[in-house]
Image (spheres, helix red, strand yellow):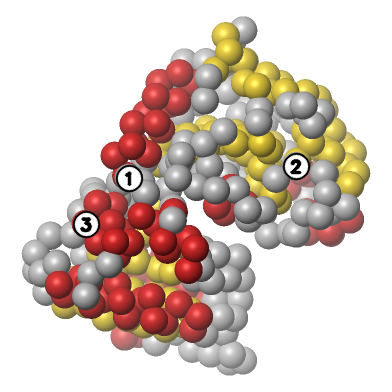
Amino acid sequence: MATRWTENVLGSCLGLRPVETVFVLVDEPLREAGEALCASARDLGAGAARCWPLTLPDPPLALVPESLLTHVRNADVIVSLFGRLDPWAGSAPLRASIAAFRAARRGRWAFGAHIDGEALERELTADCARVARTVQRIAHEIGGADEVHIATEAGTDLQFRLGGRPVHRETSFLTEQGAFGNLPGGEVYAAPLEWSAEGKLVVDLSLGGIALTGPLTLHFREGRVVEMSGAAAAELQRRLGDDPWARTVGEFGIGGNPFVRTRGIAALDEKALGTVHLALGANRGFGGENTAATHCDCVIGAPRIVLDGRPLLL
């Protein structure tokens, strides 16, 4: 039987149409949620719906089943729900599925990481139209801006340039062929000029893939982190390694989802209205030149944002 969150994901977010096929990928903690999603898809008139549990991380010598890739290539709608913070780590089937989806150039995929019962009932029941309106408003304000200055009471004082690079919108709607987006959605983001970040970023909400037990301070010069201090500094240093691109600014993002509650998880916090995230690392997929193999989101709360000398109201 359809529930509020399953109807919202399939109907509002993905625009499921009668007779379309649905394929659901889950890890073991969310098998029941995946089955509920398939049942809801059938109630809404889907032609077929199947749930495929993945073991994360892969067992030793695991192979990628060709039948999995066939389902991905042929599905009209794909939903993935994972309880893990980083489902990509150690999952050859997931990486192969994403590659197969992109090569097929069809279907729509909604991807949820670090999903639990609270996220199902709160974030995944969000009013997609309201999220989209908020995202579009923020994107309109940013469009055409060059110089960005961010400050917080926690100590952030950072400036950088966008240099005319495209501003991207993640509205929560995934209704076009080939669309791939996050659950929950709701952010505006762009790739800053890689050499332009100057100043200090105090990360006080969350850090991608790393537990943040206290503020982390990053000092930028000519776009790169030249000094870091705080509880997570040693682990971040280890993960970034020696690649200078991994320490270079890669993304400027603003959360646009008023239904997301911050809880110390970057994948969720970065969507929350009233937050900003600066990422270190790769950005070539959305308009930048950073070639790093990594991408680490640094999320801050209660920012004051000034665009070309004009305050942005969130």
Q: Residue most toward the top?
A: 309
Q: Residue at x 63, y 39 (%)?
A: 277
Residue 261 visible? The answer is: yes
Q: Secondary structure at mark 3?
A: helix
Residue kind at label 2, given as amino acid type: Asp
Local packing at callout 3 (Cα closer than 10 Å; few below 14, some 14-19, many 20+) is some
Q: Nearer the viewer, residue 283 or 278?
A: 278
Gap between marks 2 and 1, in whole Å? 28 Å
Q: Which residue is mark 2?
A: 204
Mark earlier in primary sequence (3, 2)? 3
Residue 162: horizontal and vertical position, in percent?
Answer: 58, 23
Q: Nearer the viewer, residue 306 or 93?
A: 306
Q: Which residue is mark 3?
A: 11
Residue 227: horizontal and vertical position, in percent?
Answer: 89, 39
Q: Secondary structure at mark 1?
A: loop
Mark earlier in primary sequence (3, 1)? 3
Residue kind at label 1, given as amino acid type: Asp
Q: Quadrant of residue 30?
A: bottom left
Q: Which residue is mark 1?
A: 127
Residue 46's place in the image compared with 139, above or below, is below
